[in-house]
């Protein structure tokens, strides 16, 4: 896996302020199981009930594609409908997300609108979502996040790389906080999302109960056994 | 008009892939763009195709699109006033 | 530490090398033609296609064409050509591949009867095939972020090298023209039926293009080109406004450019050339002019290359950066093909004919769906 060398220890002290995992019908926020449905519940039903449970009443949710809905709800729970958006300028907050499937689930649905020459009705409302970074765009609009954004693709979550990239960005650019993680949805509607809110530590780590921002931390949270059952 | 509104709700949901919305959730007076459902100019293109395909109505330009697609109700009114009688639906 | 450009290659409708492409552009040639896209849907469009016969014969010399998809073949030829004549060891663990693409092998999704594994349509799989071919030990970094992917890939590679994570980077940007994308843009009514006219009063849409661009970067000055051109840095920003249309005031692009200059400590007055995004859609080009005006960059010579080889999506940022770097090494401004009359919201200084000019610093900018914007700065070493 590619590696982004972290700067010298102590150069920048970052913490995971909050994290949210969504997988197998479960939603976990900061180690607390927030919501649970039977793992056999299909994705569209699951995401519909999660939207109601989230209670954001964000009407733009309805026009999003499925990948964006997954990313949006995971972020909405992470930020608690924006209440936990870092107290920084909009342009100082970045989003660095990755997945393996890109927007393939939506791509396949778009192709269904153009099956052959005689049935050629390309749907613009779907086509617009045939890029994975549209999900990031939706988050930026919802929370007015205007900083750097980038979407990476990898076969599996590469927390070493994300950690290195985000650390480098927060140390050497004007960015001061980031939402980073993995939001994936395949053509069989298997889904998983894990998002971390990363911020600079402003006080000594002794007083700060937050988890340190390490790739190991992210890996451990992502691999939580109970999320796999 | 009620039948048309019911039909339009189904068409809008289908065409824009609003799969988590049921016709009952979609108030006919709800602004479709900006604060309402947050539809945008791309969605307006899809709706224009629906208007043409189902009701034989072509819209002139962006301004007309904004006016007609304000809500399901304004769409229904425009269709009732301008429907091409030879066109099916 | 400085990150140098060591080599590059361009594959577009205009040719299979940077030199060939530059020659054709300088001669005012365009690779845009009215053609049918693919063979299933009968979509006719003004597009820029890489010559398939030449692609076949070039690839035939080096490997079994059947093993690789169209995009992969283009990518492999491009990287091979770029590496030739450099000392860069692509098999070394000190070399990382960074790949930019929006839709990868999307033609495989359109045509399920293809001869490859089902996961070949995955972007990570395409990248792996390319990395494996060259024997590089790392999983490539893949950036897929709409039309700013190429610029972001260069920024990512720059940061990887500057942090000493690696010594060399092979940055490849590539996309093919597909029925999938053509149908989509057609549904947006965003395509022009004729060769596009970036920044022009009568512009009416974009043309799709395909191609691959490779930039080889290195932190070793001994491996850099004689002109010693460096990537100073770059930035991105989101409009946070609309997912499909560019922002009406260009705020995101303005911030991306401003942040690029701030981060690199370069001043507006020293920018000698801007490679615009210039897709020739009414809104995009207006938005760029607003952002440039706000930055005080409206009198800097600017062009768009979309009139030469179309909008190559994931390849655009890399291909167009290569031309920016060549413009610097040859001190030559290339005309904005397709432009005739000013017609953007704010006046900008569009290059109307090829001209010689010393360029020490150039800025590449890009914008894309999802409200994303990016900028990257290239400079001659010793000029800052």
Image (spheres, grey):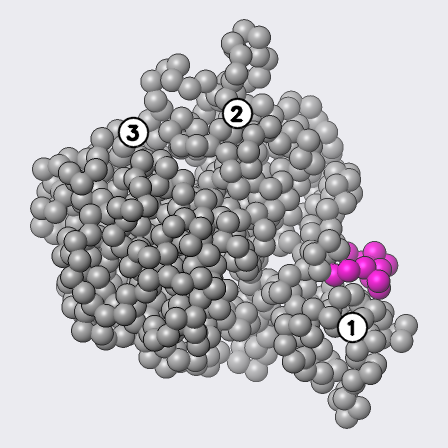
x and y percent of residue C242 in the render? 58, 54
Q: Quick check: marks 2 and 3 in contact, CB under 8 Å?
A: no
Q: Quick check: marks 1 and 2 in contact, CB under 8 Å?
A: no
Q: Secondary structure at mark 3?
A: loop
Subunit under mark 1: B
Q: Main secondary structure of the magenta part?
A: loop
**Which stretch appears magenta?**
B21-32
Q: Viewer-proximal residue, C73 or A225?
A: C73
**Quadrant of image for the N terminus of chain C:** top left
Q: Secondary structure at mark 1?
A: helix
Instruction: Tell me if residue B28 is in the magenta stretch.
Output: yes
Which residue occupies 22% across, 74% down? Answer: C28
Name the residue carrying label 3. C163
Q: What crowding class fits label 3: few (fewer than 14 Cα within 10 Å), some (14-19), or many (20 or more)? A: some
x and y percent of residue C33 in the render? 33, 79
Subunit under mark 3: C
How far is mark 1 from mark 3, CA to CA? 57 Å
The answer to whether tags 2 and 3 share a subunit is no
Q: Quick check: marks 1 and 3 in contact, CB under 8 Å?
A: no
Name the residue carrying label 2. A199
């Amino acid at each position: 896996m590619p590696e982004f060398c972290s700067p010298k220890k102590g150069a920048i002290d970052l913490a995971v302020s909050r994290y949210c995992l969504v997988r197998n019908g479960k939603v976990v926020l900061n180690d607390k199981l927030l919501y649970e449905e039977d793992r056999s519940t299909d994705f569209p039903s699951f995401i519909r009930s999660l939207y109601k449970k989230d209670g954001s009443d964000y009407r733009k949710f309805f026009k999003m594609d499925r990948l964006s809905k997954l990313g949006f709800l995971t972020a909405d729970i992470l930020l608690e409908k924006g209440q936990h958006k870092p107290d920084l300028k909009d342009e100082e907050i970045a989003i660095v997300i990755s997945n393996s499937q890109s927007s393939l689930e939506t791509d396949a649905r778009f192709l269904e609108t153009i099956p052959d020459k005689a049935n050629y009705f390309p749907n613009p409302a779907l086509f617009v979502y045939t890029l994975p970074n549209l999900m990031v765009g939706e988050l930026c609009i919802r929370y007015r996040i205007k900083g750097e954004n980038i979407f990476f693709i990898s076969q599996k979550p590469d927390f070493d790389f994300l950690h290195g990239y985000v650390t480098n960005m927060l140390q050497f650019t004007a960015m001061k906080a980031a939402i980073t993680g993995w939001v994936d949805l395949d053509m069989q509607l298997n889904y998983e999302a894990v998002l971390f809110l990363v911020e600079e530590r402003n006080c000594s780590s002794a007083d700060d109960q937050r988890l340190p921002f390490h790739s190991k931390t992210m890996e451990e949270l992502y691999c939580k056994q109970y999320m796999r059952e | 008009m009620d039948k048309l509104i019911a039909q339009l709700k189904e068409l809008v949901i289908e065409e824009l892939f609003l799969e988590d919305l049921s016709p009952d959730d979609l108030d006919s007076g709800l602004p479709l763009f900006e604060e309402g459902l947050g539809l945008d100019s791309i969605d307006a293109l899809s709706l224009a195709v629906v208007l043409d395909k189902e009701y034989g109505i072509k819209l002139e330009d962006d301004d007309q699109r904004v006016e007609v697609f304000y809500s399901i109700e304004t769409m229904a009114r425009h269709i009732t006033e301008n429907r091409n009688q030879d066109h099916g639906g | 530490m400085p990150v140098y450009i060591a080599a590059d290659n361009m594959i577009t409708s205009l040719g299979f090398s940077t030199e060939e492409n530059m020659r054709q552009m300088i001669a005012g040639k365009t690779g845009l033609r009215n053609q049918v896209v693919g063979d299933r849907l009968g979509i006719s469009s003004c597009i820029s296609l890489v010559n398939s016969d030449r692609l076949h014969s070039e690839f035939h010399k080096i490997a079994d064409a059947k093993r690789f998809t169209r995009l992969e073949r283009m990518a492999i030829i491009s990287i091979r050509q770029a590496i030739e004549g450099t000392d860069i060891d692509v098999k070394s663990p000190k070399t990382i591949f960074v790949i930019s693409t929006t839709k990868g092998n999307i033609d495989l999704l359109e045509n399920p009867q293809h001869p490859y594994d089902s996961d070949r349509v995955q972007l990570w799989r395409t990248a792996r095939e390319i990395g494996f071919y060259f024997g590089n030990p790392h999983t490539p970094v893949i950036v897929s972020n709409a039309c700013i992917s190429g610029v972001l890939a260069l920024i990512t590679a720059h940061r990887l090298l500057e942090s000493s994570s690696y010594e060399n980077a092979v940055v490849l940007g590539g996309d093919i023209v597909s029925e999938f994308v053509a149908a989509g843009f057609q549904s947006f009514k965003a395509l022009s039926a004729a060769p596009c006219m970036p920044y022009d009063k009568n512009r009416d849409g974009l043309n799709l293009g395909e191609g691959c661009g490779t930039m080889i970067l290195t932190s070793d000055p001994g491996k850099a080109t004689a002109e010693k051109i460096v990537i100073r840095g770059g930035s991105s920003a989101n409009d946070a406004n609309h997912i499909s249309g560019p922002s009406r005031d260009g705020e995101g692009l303005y911030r991306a450019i401003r942040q690029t200059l701030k981060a690199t400590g370069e001043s507006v007055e020293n920018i000698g050339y801007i490679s615009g995004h210039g897709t020739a859609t009414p809104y995009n080009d207006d938005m760029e002019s607003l952002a440039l005006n706000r930055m005080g960059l409206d009198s800097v010579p600017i062009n768009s290359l979309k009139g030469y080889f179309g909008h190559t999506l994931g390849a655009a940022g890399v291909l167009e950066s290569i031309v920016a770097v060549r413009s610097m090494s040859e001190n030559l401004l290339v005309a904005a093909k397709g432009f005739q009359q000013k017609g953007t919201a704010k006046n900008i200084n569009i290059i109307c004919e090829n001209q010689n000019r010393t360029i020490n610093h150039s800025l590449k900018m890009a914008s894309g769906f999802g409200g994303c914007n990016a900028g990257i700065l290239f400079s001659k070493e010793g000029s800052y």
